[in-house]
Amino acid sequence: MNAREAAARVTRELVSAGIEDAAFEAEYLVRTAAGISRAQFFARAELNDSDCARLDEIVSRRLTREPAAYIAGEREFYGLALEVSPDVLLPRPETELLVDLAIKETASLAAPVIIDVGTGSGAIAIATSLKLPGATVIGTDVSELALAVAARNTARHGAKVQFVVADLLTPFRRADIILANLPYIPTEEVQALEPEVRDWEPIVALDGGGDGLELVRAIVDDCAGRLRPGLLALEIGFGQSRAVQAYCESRGAKTEIVPDLAGIERVVCARWE
């Protein structure tokens, strides 16, 4: 069986299970099982018996709604291949906007201190560190298991990031930039999430409390005394930007809302002067 024939079979199985983007996922699973590139896939590389057995195992896992990235153990973020596991939230493409904002903000800073709060896999911190080698980059998380994944990703890419077990900004006195992709899903909406998210990603990285903004408000309160001057860039969910903007302004910040590539208001930037 060649790779494209295998993908056609897997596509049918995924469609029957109600999994979206079945053809794309099937290609990814076949390439993961056989360890082949996209070029090899489209060239109809042959799968041996070991590849086929591995593919059957992988597809069985995917049919339980385990995310493909957890099955592969890897996810790309800002052009970097990062280790992922159910101990960490899967990095999303829209979160790359936080890295872009950090790069833009540091243009006039000589040796900025940047803190990535709720670092998870270390995606934001590592990408930022590699783009800004003169910066001191710190990643924090309440989960030691998540920080272990982040540390391995840092070593893998030769980044210079300090990781600290911390609840928000508790150990720190000041910073120039704080980047945060905190839980922002309202508690009552968590159970309505797709199974790949609800049943596999860490609940502590998803559930933002009653209105989804409990930790967001907490970090804004923390930042008011640590960023003078400085930038807080907060990723938020759909429809939350105005509430977050108003809260930041009530704490003395000047704000800006930044959309992602899809035009969704994705990040609230707050500055204290």
Image (cartoon, rainbow, N blue to C red):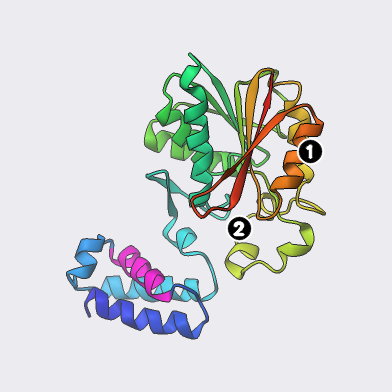
Tell me how far mark 1 sits from mark 2, CA to CA: 28 Å
Q: Is residue 180 visible?
A: yes
Give percent across and percent down for residue 239: 69, 54
Principal secondary structure, stretch drawn in magenta? helix
Give percent across and percent down for residue 252: 78, 26
Q: Residues within 10 Å of mark 2 (few under 14, many from 20)?
A: many
Residue placed most toward the observer, 202 or 266: 266
| SS state under label 1 | helix
* Residue sitting at x 57%, y 66%: 196
* Residue sitting at x 75%, y 34%: 248
Q: Which residue is mark 2?
A: 201
Q: Is residue 24 magenta?
A: yes
First in residue order: circle 1 vs circle 2: 2
Q: Which residue is mark 1?
A: 247
Instruction: Classify 101 as above or below 243.
Output: above
* Residue sitting at x 54%, y 71%: 65
Instruction: Classify 69 as above or below 8.
Output: above
Which image quarter is the C terminus in?
Answer: top right
**Given the image, on which type of amino acid does mark 2 rest?**
Glu
The magenta span reads 22-34
Residue placed most toward the observer, 188 or 118: 188
